[in-house]
Image: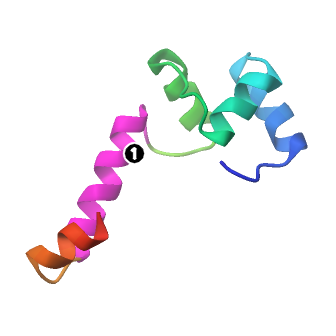
Amino acid sequence: MAGVSAAIQKWLAYELEVTEGAVSRYASGKTTPRKSLQERLFEALELPYKTIDDFLQDKIFYKISKAKSLTDTFTLC
């Protein structure tokens, strides 16, 4: 979420019922939303995940499925 505009951060803070500072820290990667907040985050962003782990597993599976060889798999990850 790097480079997220102030208006979007304000909207997301409202949706998640957290401070704009918290959203800013999430966007910069300084902190990660707690698990109980992750589902609401993905729901607000209309993404089909419940946790960051779900998102990462999906991304890794996608990269592995697109790899042509085992070497490609490790290069992509």
In terms of depth relative to the viewer, which is nearer, 9 or 21? 21
Residue 2 horizontal/vertical position (percent): 69, 51
Disc 1 designates what residue? 55
Residue 64 horizontal/vertical position (percent): 21, 67
Instruction: State which quadrant residue 73 falls in.
Output: bottom left
Q: How many marks?
A: 1
Left or right of residue 49: residue 72: left
Left or right of residue 73: residue 32: right
Left or right of residue 77: residue 20: right
Position of the C terminus by quadrant? bottom left
Q: Main secondary structure of the magenta part?
A: helix
Q: Residue furthest left?
A: 70
The colouring scheme, among rainbow, by chain, secondary structure or one colour, is rainbow
Residue at position x 90%, y 42% in the image: 7
Residue 39 horizontal/vertical position (percent): 50, 27
Residue at position x 59%, y 39% in the image: 29
Q: Residue furthest bottom?
A: 68
Q: Residue furthest right?
A: 7
Which kind of residue does numbered mark 1 sit on?
A: Phe
Instruction: State which quadrant residue 35 falls in.
Output: top left
For label 1, the crowd category at 10 Å Cα-Cα, with few meaning under 14, some 14 to 19 and many 20 or more, is some
Instruction: State which quadrant residue 62 falls in.
Output: bottom left
Q: Is residue 64 above or below residue 57?
A: below
- Element at label 1: helix
Question: Which region of the structure is painted magenta?
Answer: 49-66
Residue at position x 11%, y 80% in the image: 69
Q: Was residue 45 drawn as part of the magenta stretch in this picture?
A: no
In terms of depth relative to the viewer, which is nearer, 36 or 4? 4
Residue 59 horizontal/vertical position (percent): 35, 57
Q: Is residue 65 above or below residue 61?
A: below
Residue at position x 67%, y 41% in the image: 28
